[in-house]
Image: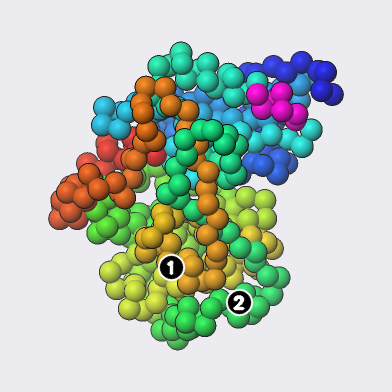
Amino acid sequence: MDRLPTKVRILAPADTARWDVFVHACPQATFFHLSAWKDIIEGVFRHRCFFLYAERAGEIAAVLPLAEVKSRLFGHALSSLPFCVYGGIAAGAEAGPEVVAALEAEAEALARRLGVQHLEYRNLQPRHADWPRQSLYVTFRKGILPEVEANMLAIPRKQRAMVRKGINNGLVGQLDDGVDRFFALYADNVRRHGTPALPKRFFAALRAHFGEACEVLTVTDPAGRPLSSVLSFYFRDEVLPYYAGDDAAARALAANDFKYWELMRRACERGCRVFDYGRSKLGTGPYAFKKNWGFEPQPLSYEYRLYKRDSVPQNNPANPKYRAFIALWKRLPLGVANALGPHIVRNLG
């Protein structure tokens, strides 16, 4: 097998089905390696995508989804993958180091042809010890126990009390057909925190492309008032709550705690085995919230190949130079923020 030639190709529409078959079967692959991200990123954000795959004897051996992001404000990058927390190369069990090397060589050649400032891999595990690395982010992943009550008892006592508070408040979890209630809560929430909202059509595209693998769960009070909502992905035996939002009244009613418990309960009954709480920045409120649920942080290895810059980019709200912008954004009317936000956030990724 090692003597077979490796060919690197760019994904064509006719090959999306076999690309996704490979991704679902590859242990290194994640939900964010699926081919639908190409249509979503190009269609919603107008970023050119180059989904590379290495082929041996007519079979896909490894994949590398890439997108080019051009921004006057944040620079010019080739990334795997914007708007996704995991990325980089996913190689099959029989793919040797020469397969990975061929994909990386093509990615670097592409980066140089495009003239980008840097190439970024959003790896779960380190690959290049000598590359500059972003150490700001961690992820939180934990097994889901087979029995619903066992998962409740596994939540640390104080956080479990908050979940029970939400239950005692009569909160109700409902699956939504669309994204209207989710988006209203999400957009208001991110504005309160001083960051632009992604466009509503992005969330509609996620639902349209991923179907049953993309789900919206909304929590209401007994009167039916929406309090908190989460858009989640399902991949193999994992559930990934990915985007969330809440009303200002949600905290007092423990709606956020109830929301994630309701998602975990439903995922357990669905047969899922892993709850992926997702990426958070070190030292933030979401980081502390997830730790309080008994999840341990796992460092993410975001690696960079620098071409026309001297340091790793810091295009995130933790960058001190964005503090004035964040303070201003919090004061914008919601309608104005929602109108302006998509033009800004498309370049953040």
Residue at the disc numbered 2: 154
Q: Residues within 10 Å of mark 1 (few under 14, many from 20)?
A: some
Q: Is residue 35 above or below residue 186?
A: above
Given residues 81 and 188, the one toward you in this image is: 81
User: Magenta region: which residues?
Assistant: 95-101
Q: Nearer the viewer, residue 121 or 154?
A: 121
Q: Position of residue 172 (x, y in %)?
A: 46, 75
Tag 1: amino acid: Phe
Q: Is residue 102 in the magenta section?
A: no
- Image location of residue 281, percent across then percent down: 41, 54
- Quarter occupied by the N terminus: top right
Please report the residue visible at 24 percent of the width from the left and 53 percent of the height from the top.
194
Q: Position of residue 25 (x, y in %)?
A: 73, 41
**Residue named by callout 1:** 289
Near mark 2 (Cα within 10 A), the count class, few <14, some 14-19 or many ≥20, is few
Give the left or right position of residue 72, taking residue 99 as reference. Answer: left
* Residue at (31% x, 67% y) in the render: 247
In this view of the protein, can residue 25 be seen by the observer? Answer: yes
- Magenta span main SS: helix
Q: Residue furthest front?
A: 130
Res 46 seen here: no
Do the numbered discs 1 and 2 sit on residues whose CB atoms are within 8 Å?
no
Name the residue at the bottom extreme.
168
- In the rendered structure, the answer to whether residue 284 lies left or right of residue 28 reads left
Image quadrant in which the C terminus is located: top left
Q: Secondary structure under badge 2?
A: helix
Q: What kind of element bears circle 1? A: helix
In the image, is residue 246 above or below residue 334? below
Please say whether residue 97 is one of the residues in the magenta stretch.
yes
Q: Residue at x 63, y 18 (%)?
A: 9
